[in-house]
Image (cartoon, grey):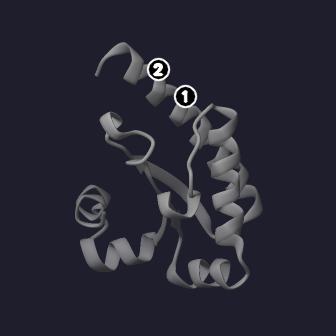
């Protein structure tokens, strides 16, 4: 990873941390987020996974449009870091701890690799 990519990654992580902390305050059941990216095709390749505690919390969040609240938090934090996503909804996925446990025995690394 060259110096430019390291700086970009650092700015990205800082922005996503801000978004995550804000979302945890605003959305019940939201727990954490993670991201993947191919920096040779950034920001088009950026994929952010937002993790809820269980399926019911995720469904409730979607029913009350709190998924959009999270996307707005992410978009705002990224913009403040100078990262522009043309269509933020295309870059954000939602998942649950419960689903990972059920389908991948709690192995997030495996789940992320198999769910692009």
- Looking at the image, do the residues carrying marks 2 and 1 touch, with CB atoms under 8 Å apart? yes
Q: Residue at x 37, y 14 (%)?
A: 3
Q: Is residue 90 left or right of residue 16?
A: left
**Relative image position of residue 86 (x, y in whole percent):** 56, 52
Q: Residue at x 73, y 81 (%)?
A: 64
The quarter of the rendered structure image containing the N terminus is: top left
Give the residue number, with chain letter if any, for mark 1: 11
The quarter of the rendered structure image containing the C terminus is: bottom left
* Front position in the image: 83 or 13: 83
Dot 1 falls on a residue whose secondary structure is: helix
- Looking at the image, residue 49 lies above or below residue 52: above
Q: Residue at x 57, y 78 (%)?
A: 58
**Relative image position of residue 73 (x, y in whole percent):** 70, 53
Q: Which mark identifies residue 101?
A: none
Taking the view exactly as shown, the residue that stands out farthest to the front is 86
In the rendered picture of this protein, how many numbered marks are placed on residues? 2
Taking the view exactly as shown, the residue that stands out farthest to the right is 26
- Looking at the image, residue 99 lies above or below residue 87: below
Q: Which mark identifies residue 7?
A: 2
Dot 2 falls on a residue whose secondary structure is: helix
**Relative image position of residue 98 (x, y in whole percent):** 43, 76
- Looking at the image, residue 83 lies above or below residue 85: above
**Relative image position of residue 111 (x, y in whole percent):** 28, 64
> Disc 2 versus disc 1: distance between alpha carbons?
6 Å
- Looking at the image, residue 83 lies above or below residue 53: above
């Amino acid at each position: 990873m060259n110096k430019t990519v390291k700086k970009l990654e650092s700015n990205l992580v800082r922005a996503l941390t801000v978004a995550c902390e804000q979302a945890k305050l605003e959305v019940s059941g939201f727990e954490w987020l993670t991201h993947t990216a191919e920096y040779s095709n950034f920001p088009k390749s950026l994929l952010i996974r937002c993790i809820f505690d269980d399926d019911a919390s995720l469904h409730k969040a979607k029913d009350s449009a709190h998924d959009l609240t999270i996307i707005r938090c992410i978009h705002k934090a990224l913009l403040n870091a100078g990262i522009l996503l043309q269509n933020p909804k295309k870059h954000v996925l939602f998942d649950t701890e419960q689903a990972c446990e059920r389908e991948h025995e709690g192995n997030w690394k495996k789940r992320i690799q198999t769910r692009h």
